[in-house]
Image: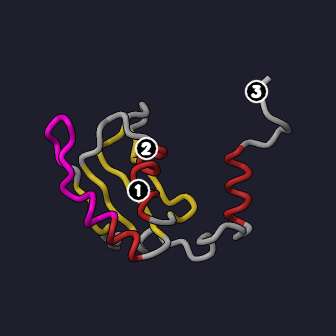
């Protein structure tokens, strides 16, 4: 009951679809295109939380959401979201940057700067 069918994990399925470029955006995915840097995140933030907040603004690339975690599993306070369209990225940034959270902290949402070197 509730164990699903077959011996394949969902991660294996997702990775296979991305590698086969069967998902829209998988063929041209770049970590710097239409990417946002999000800071001020609570310590219990997970990838799915970022997805729930940022997906309503537009299509997100496969593997395009990442909350950066400590080895213990709690969030380091920042993460990244990669949109398929620049307009979605701009709308999310304009709407969410400066959002005040219940504890008084402020969310920073800005363009991700390309890695140097």
Q: Secondary structure at mark 1?
A: helix
Pointers 3 and 2 in contact (C-beta within 8 Å) = no
Calculate the distance from the C-alpha at mark 1 to the C-alpha at mark 2: 9 Å
Quadrant that contains the N terminus = top right
Rendered residue at 79%/34% (across/down) = 4
Residue 98 lies in the magenta stretch: yes
Calculate the distance from the C-alpha at mark 1 to the C-alpha at mark 3: 30 Å
Would you call the spot at circle 3 few (<14 residues within 10 Å), some (14-19), or many (20 or more)? few
Rendered residue at 23%/59% (across/down) = 97
* Residue under pointer 1: 54
Question: Going from the N terminus, do you reach mark 1 or mark 3 first?
Answer: 3
Q: Secondary structure at mark 2?
A: helix
Quadrant that contains the C terminus = bottom left
Picture coordinates of residue 38, whole percent (x, y): 30, 55
Vertical placement of 60 versus 78: above or below?
below
Would you call the spot at circle 1 few (<14 residues within 10 Å), some (14-19), or many (20 or more)? many
Question: Going from the N terminus, do you reach mark 3 or mark 2 first?
Answer: 3
Would you call the spot at circle 2 few (<14 residues within 10 Å), some (14-19), or many (20 or more)? few
Span highlighted in magenta in the image: 92-106
How is the model colour-coded? secondary structure
Vertical placement of 63 versus 21: above or below?
above
Report the disc number at residue 49: 2
């Amino acid at each position: 009951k509730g164990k699903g069918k077959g011996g394949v994990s969902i991660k294996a399925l997702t990775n296979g679809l991305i590698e086969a470029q069967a998902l829209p955006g998988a063929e041209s995915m770049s970590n710097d295109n239409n990417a946002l840097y999000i800071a001020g995140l609570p310590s219990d933030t997970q990838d799915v939380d970022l997805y729930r907040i940022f997906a309503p603004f537009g299509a997100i690339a496969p593997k395009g959401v990442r909350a950066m975690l400590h080895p213990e599993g709690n969030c380091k306070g920042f993460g990244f979201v990669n949109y398929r369209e620049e307009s979605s990225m701009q709308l999310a940034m304009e709407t969410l940057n400066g959002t005040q959270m219940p504890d008084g902290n402020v969310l920073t949402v800005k363009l991700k700067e390309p890695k140097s070197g």
